[in-house]
Structures are given as C-alpha cells and as structure tokens.
Amino acid sequence: MSRLILLLFFSTFPFLTLTDGLNRVIEGLIKMAIVSSNDSINSKKNLTILEEQEINLNDIGLDFFAGTLKIPDVTVVGLENLNYVNDMNVSIDDDTNILTLELNAVMLPASGLVIQSYEADMGLFNSIPIYGSGDIKFLIKNVAVPILVTFDITNLKVNTLTIVPELRANEISINGFWNNPELSLVLSETLSALEQLAIMFYNSEIDCISCVLSTLIKTAINNAIHPEDQSLSISQYLSMAESECQATCSLSKSAALRGMFQGNNGVKLSEYKEEHFKSIAEELTRSLVEYVSKNMVDKL
C-alpha cells in the first residue's frame, strides 16, 4: 500500500506548476504513506538485517584483531514500539514548491540488536583471547529522533535535513563469553556502564554529531536521487560535513572533535584517510580493553 501511495506521489513531479488543491492532495498522500509504513514496520516486530555470516577478522585490515566470528543472524528487535506519526507535520509551500516534513520518531520502551548463537574465536593484540558461544543483546531505551526535512520538489533535491537522535539509557547482555557465566555477567555490567558513559558524551556533543550525521545523510540522499551528477568519494562526503559543521563543531567541548574541524593535530576531517581511521580504531580498542580489564577485576 505504501509503495502505491509513494508511486502516486512521485508521478506528480513532472507537473511542476502545482495548484493549491493538488498540493493538498500530495500532502495527504505523503501522510498516508508515512502512516502505512509505520503500521508495516510495527507488524514486523523483529527484522533480520544480516543473514548467516562467518567473518574472518584477518581480512578487515586491522592488524591488532585476528580470528573468526560466526553469526547466524543479526536482528533488530522492538520495531513494534516504533511510532513516528503522532507528531507528524507535512506541508508544501504553494509559491516555492518546497515540501517541509517534520517527524518525531519514538521507540518506547526499547529497541536494539540481537545476535543469537554467536561463535567467537578471536584475539586482540596477539595476547588477549576472546572466545565463546552464546547470545548478545544491545538495547537502547527510550529513543527519540526528531527529523526536519525541506525538499525542493521542482529540482528533486533535499535542501535541509536535521536529525537529532536522542539517547537516554541502554542495556547490554552477553552470555557465553569465555564459556563462563560469571564472567559474562560481569562483562555485560561493565559494557553497559561504559555505553552509558558513551551516551553521556554523545548527548553533550549532540549539536556537532547531529550536524555531521544530518549532512552525510542529506548528501547521500541527493547523490542517490541524482547519481548521474557524480559519485562522491568518502573524502568528499567528509569535506561537505567539515564545511557545513565547521562553526558548530569548533565549539565542541571535546578536544578530539574540535581538532577534526580545526586541524589541531595536523589533519582535518576532510583529509582523513584509511590509515587515520585504523589508528583511531586501534586507540579506541586499547582504551576499551584497559577500561574493561580494570572494571572486571574490580567486580570479581
């Protein structure tokens, strides 16, 4: 049903001089499509986003990570809790043909990812074994995502996009780690505490993170609508994010974020290459290992 409504909506694009009445019809069709899609997602409840995989970590290019990870599937849970129609607003400016769409997507009480029956045989830094089999659950509780979009119907282009994901609480549950129930419980509690710290950091830097996220998504949408224009590289995406978010992110409380936009470390965001991201991944992994090791020892 939602596909039919969207087809009717997009079929009106050739008629760029729209009457007031036709604009109201299009607004109604968009609202119907949004409500229909929300109902469709709710009915699924759970959605498998990754089928059975055996990942060879030696192939991903991170020297400090090796081994294999078998995953039967990765499932998004909690979709029955999704609601993005209550605070919906759709309007088209009759003079400019600019569509404005406002949504507030809410997922209560929780949503997240579930991996069932994983099998891990991995190692970190050639010294830390990670093995076991069991289930993993990552949940984010009380999620809200306000979205504001303005779309130029005449030129088929997203003019502005603002997405501000609001994260409040979390839950991580891992069993089968090192095939030890007690260690699995301690690891779950430790990672949940760490994730809560990450959420606190995220919320303190929401302006910068939201700007970067919104810019990347807007650029990707426009590139998908007009693929004939050019195929953008990762560095071009980052350059656009750097340009649009320079003022906001330069005020960040985080020295690391400020450095990405001011070039304090000699490299700006648009100049990041694969080796920079690998270096960041290794540094974050070392910090994670140190944090988890210390806190698990304290709990045992």
Image (cartoon, rainbow, N blue to C red):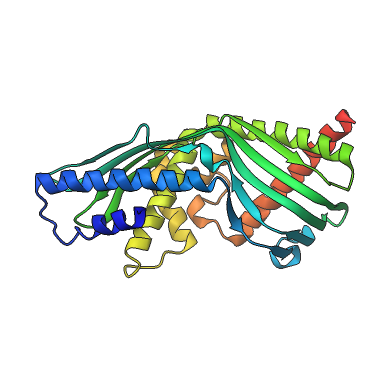
Q: Is residue 234 left or right of residue 285?
A: left
Residue at (86%, 29%) from the top-left corner?
A: 299
Residue 242 locus on image (x, y percent): 44, 48
The quadrant of the rendering that contains the C terminus is: top right
Determine the residue positioned at 80% across, 38% down. 187
| Up/down of 265 relative to 107, above or below | below
In this picture, residue 261 sits left or right of residue 65: left
Q: Is residue 253 in view?
A: no
Between 34 and 101, the one lying in front of the other is 34
Q: Residue 178, can we see it?
A: yes
Residue 210 % position (x, y): 46, 39
The residue at the point 87 percent across, 53 percent down is 129
**How many dots with numbers?**
0
Rendering coords of residue 157 (x, y %): 28, 55
The residue lying at 25 percent from left, 57 percent from top is: 8
Residue 237 against residue 162 in the figure, above or below: below
**Against 270, is 290 above or below?**
above
